[in-house]
Structures are given as C-alpha cells and as structure tokens.
Amino acid sequence: MVFVYGFIGWTGYVSLSNWNSLVPDFSFAGLKNYAFLFNDYRFQADLRNTLFFTLFFIIAVLASGLLLAILLDQKIRGESLFRNIFFFPMALSFIVTGVVWQWLLNPSTGVNLLLKKFGMSPLWYTSVKVIPGVEWGKIEFGVPVAIIAVVIAAMWQMTGFSLAMYLAGLRGIPEELREAARMDGASELQVYTKIILPLLMPITVSVIIIMAHISLKIFDLIYAMTGPGANFVTDVPGMYMFETTFRGNYYANGAAITIIMLLSVAIFIVPYLISSRKGGS
C-alpha cells in the first residue's frame, strides 16, 4: 500500500503542484503542468513515437513468435538447441541489447560499415526523416524512420517470450482436433486459420497486453541505443520524464509525465485484469 499506491498518490499530488525547481513548492497548480505537456512539441513527438513503436513492436513480436513456434512445433531435429537460441536474448537486459544494437547499426561500425562497401546508405538508423501521416489536433502522427531501428532491437529481445507462449499453446492443442479437420478436407492453412489460431487467441491477448506494457514505459533500450535522437525522432515519455525530473529539476512536470504513462498502461492492463478475474470466478 505504501510503496506502490502511496507513491502513486504522492506523484499525482506533485503533478498538480508548482514544484518545478530545487526548492519544493506544493502550492496547487491544477492541470497547468498537463496543459504545458500537451502543447509541448517534444511531448507531442513522444506520443507519436510511442504510438508507432508500440504498434510495430507488438505486430513484429506476435508475427515472429508465432512463426517460430509453428516451425518448432514440427518436431524438427535440434529443437532444444533452436529453442535455447531464441530464448537467449531474454536473459539480457535492455541496456545490453541497446549497446549491442547501437554498435551493429551505427553508420561507422557493424552492419552499416558492410553496407557502405556495397554502396548502400546506412543513414536510416540516424535519420531525422518522418514519413508524413495523419494530423490530430496539434499532433502530427508521422512515422519516424529511426524508430524502426529500435523496434528491430526490441523485437529481437522479446520474440523469445512470444515464442514460448505460443509453443506452449500449440503443444496444448490435442492432435485429434487437427486430424479431424484434415479428414474433413481442411487444408493445412485452414487448420491453422480456422482451428489453431482461434484456440490461441487467449495467448495472443496475453502477449499483446504484456508487450504493450513494456513498450509504453520503454526507457532503458532507447536510452542506451539512440537517446532522444535529433529532433526527438526516437524520444519517448520515459526519456523525457528522466531528463525533465533528474536533469532539469522540473519535478511537477516530470510527475505529470509519469501519471500520463501510468494511465496509458492502465488502459491496457485494467480491462485485462477485470476480464481475467471474471473468467476465473
């Protein structure tokens, strides 16, 4: 109660105050800090980056994890070896992953150095280009090219989790169901689309919830890999909160960012917890 809900309440209280200096000022400011954030270009860029990072990251993890799980479910030779290889990235921290992929994708080292020899441009990793998108209010939702590099690194680390979930689900589906469908004339594609994938839907929802939770509060991977990037093309609310609070000493603004991050995660987590509790009862 104290170390979770107590500090959440304290953060919410600070976000409504005027404490934006080293000297505490708890006078009531209302929603001034929130209004400042939603009119701030950097925070608008953070919302855009988080939206596209979450969307691409979840799709990539689901697709890659399901595909690898289906391949491993074919009882291939050396399955345990492949399974350990795919699970290994999960043993690393996001900091380590960020440093490794920063080296791999850096324009002067790693993979990009090899691309240069073939006349291919490696600048997409540090690109400030934003592919134009829709505009909602004052926020333009275009896709930053550089955010794709972060998605690749995050997918590489978290695909093993999706693989484990889907593989356990596939192994839990009775073989009789598949055989019955084949005997009724269903093709292998129809077996997966009409029988297996619907049965895996609870696992898919669980993976989406967990990956959304990770992506919405991502900080360490981007901090180690790219930082906020030029023109904030890879910046996220966690990065902005860290710099605002601990480098700029704008504690009320930092607390407001934290509350917004908490609410964005709650949008995914709370309905899932409620539905799980009803299903369990």
Image (cartoon, helix red, strand yellow):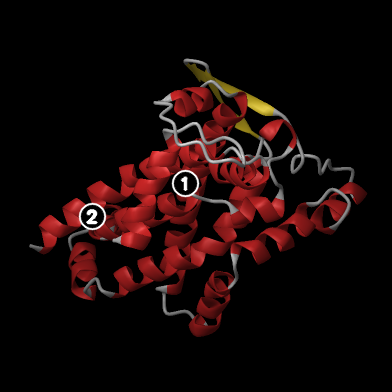
- Quarter holding the N terminus is bottom left
- How packed mark 2 is, by other alpha carbons closer than 10 Å (few <14, some 14-19, many 20 or more), is few
Q: Is residue 127 left or right of 17 when viewed as pictured?
A: right
Rendered image: mark on residue 260: none
Residue 204, placed above or below residue 138: below
Q: First in sequence: mark 2 or mark 1?
A: 1
Name the residue at the left extreme: 281
- Given residues 182 and 74, the one toward you in this image is 74
Residue at the (54%, 72%) spot, across then down: 86
Residue at the (71%, 48%) spot, across then down: 226
- Given residues 86 and 146, the one toward you in this image is 146
Callout 1 amino acid: Leu
Instruction: Measuring from the top left, give residue 88's x and y in whole percent.
Output: 57, 75
Quick one: SS at disc 1? Answer: helix
Residue at the (86%, 56%) spot, across then down: 109
Where residue 143 sits, quadrant-wise, is top right
Residue at which label 2 appears:
273
Where residue 181 sits, quadrant-wise, is bottom left
Quick one: SS at disc 2? Answer: helix
Name the residue at the right extreme: 117
- Given residues 28 and 84, the one toward you in this image is 28
Callout 2 amino acid: Leu
Residue 264 seen by the camera: no
- How packed mark 1 is, by other alpha carbons closer than 10 Å (few <14, some 14-19, many 20 or more), is many
Contact, CB < 8 Å: mark 2 with mark 1? no
Instruction: Measuring from the top left, give residue 24's x and y in whole percent.
Output: 53, 41
Residue at which label 1 appears:
216
Instruction: Measuring from the top left, give residue 45's x and y in whole percent.
Output: 59, 30
